[in-house]
C-alpha cells in the first residue's frame, strides 16, 4: 500500500524528520511502526484478524470496567503487537500515534506537520498474522487478556 512521507518539525528540540502518515481516505488502514523506522500497514477491513481481536476485546471490557466506546482506543493500543507478526528485525509493531524524532529520540505529540504535499510516496507491506492464526481460540483470548493486564485465572 502506498502512503505519503511528510516533513515534521519537533516542537521539543526543533529537529526535522520525514515520516510516513496515513491519509483519511485510507479508511480502516492503520500505520504500524516497529522501533524507529520499520513500518507496515494493518488493514482492518481486509482481514478477519481485526474482527477477531475486536470481538475478544469487547468480551474483555467488563473485566476492565471500560465502556464499549473505549474499545477502539484499546484496540489501537494493543492490536499491533497482539495479532501482528514482528517486523523483519524481530521487533513488535505498535500502531503509530505521534512521529519519532531522530534528533532527541522522543515520540511526542508536540509536532508540526508541513501543510505541503508528501515529500514522496512509499510502498509499505501489509502486516502478517501467521503466529496469531496458529493459536487456538483460548490462546488468543489469553494473549489479549495478558496484553490488557488481566489474568483470567
Image (cartoon, rainbow, N blue to C red):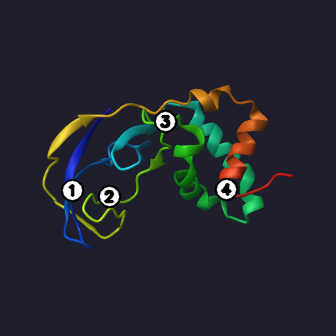
Q: What residue is disc 3 on?
A: 45
Q: Position of residue 62 (x, y in %)?
A: 76, 60
Q: Nearer the viewer, mark 4 or mark 1?
A: 1
Q: Are marks 4 and 3 in contact (CB under 8 Å)?
A: no
Residue sitting at x 75%, y 57%: 150
Q: Are marks 1 and 2 in contact (CB under 8 Å)?
A: yes
Q: What residue is disc 2 on?
A: 99
Q: Position of residue 58 (x, y in %)?
A: 69, 51
Q: Are marks 2 and 4 in contact (CB under 8 Å)?
A: no
Name the element at disc 2. Answer: loop
The residues tagged by marks 2 and 4 sit, at their Cα atoms, a distance apart of: 24 Å
Quarter of the image with the N terminus in it:
top left
Would you call the spot at circle 2 few (<14 residues within 10 Å), some (14-19), or many (20 or more)? many
First in sequence: mark 3 vs mark 2: 3
The extreme bottom residue here reads 12
First in sequence: mark 4 vs mark 1: 1
Would you call the spot at circle 3 few (<14 residues within 10 Å), some (14-19), or many (20 or more)? few
Residue sitting at x 70%, y 58%: 149
Q: Position of residue 135 (x, y in %)?
A: 70, 30
The residues tagged by marks 4 and 3 sit, at their Cα atoms, a distance apart of: 23 Å
Nearer the observer, 22 or 146: 146
Name the element at disc 4. Answer: loop
Q: Is residue 64 left or right of residue 26?
A: right
Residue sitting at x 67%, y 64%: 67
Q: Which mark is residue 142?
A: none
Would you call the spot at circle 4 few (<14 residues within 10 Å), some (14-19), or many (20 or more)? some
Q: What residue is disc 4 on?
A: 148
Name the element at disc 1. Answer: strand
Nearer the observer, 148 or 116: 148
The residues tagged by marks 3 and 2 sit, at their Cα atoms, a distance apart of: 24 Å
Q: What residue is disc 1 on?
A: 17
Is 102 drawn above or below residue 123 in the view shown?
below
Amino acid at each position: 500500500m502506498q502512503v505519503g512521507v511528510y516533513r515534521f518539525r519537533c516542537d521539543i528540540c526543533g529537529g526535522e524528520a520525514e515520516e510516513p502518515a496515513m491519509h483519511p481516505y485510507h479508511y480502516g488502514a492503520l500505520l504500524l511502526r516497529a522501533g524507529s523506522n520499520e513500518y507496515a500497514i494493518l488493514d482492518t477491513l481486509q482481514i478477519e484478524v481485526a474482527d477477531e481481536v475486536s470481538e475478544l476485546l469487547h468480551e474483555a471490557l467488563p473485566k476492565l470496567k471500560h465502556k464499549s466506546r473505549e474499545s477502539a482506543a484499546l484496540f489501537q493500543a494493543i492490536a499491533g503487537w497482539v495479532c501482528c507478526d514482528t517486523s523483519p528485525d524481530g521487533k513488535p509493531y505498535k500502531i503509530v500515534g505521534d512521529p519519532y524524532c531522530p534528533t532527541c529520540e522522543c515520540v511526542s505529540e508536540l509536532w508540526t506537520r508541513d501543510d505541503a504535499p508528501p515529500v514522496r510516496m512509499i510502498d509499505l507491506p501489509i502486516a502478517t498474522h501467521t503466529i496469531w492464526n496458529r493459536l487456538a481460540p483460548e490462546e488468543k483470548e489469553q494473549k489479549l487478556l495478558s496484553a490488557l493486564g488481566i489474568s483470567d485465572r
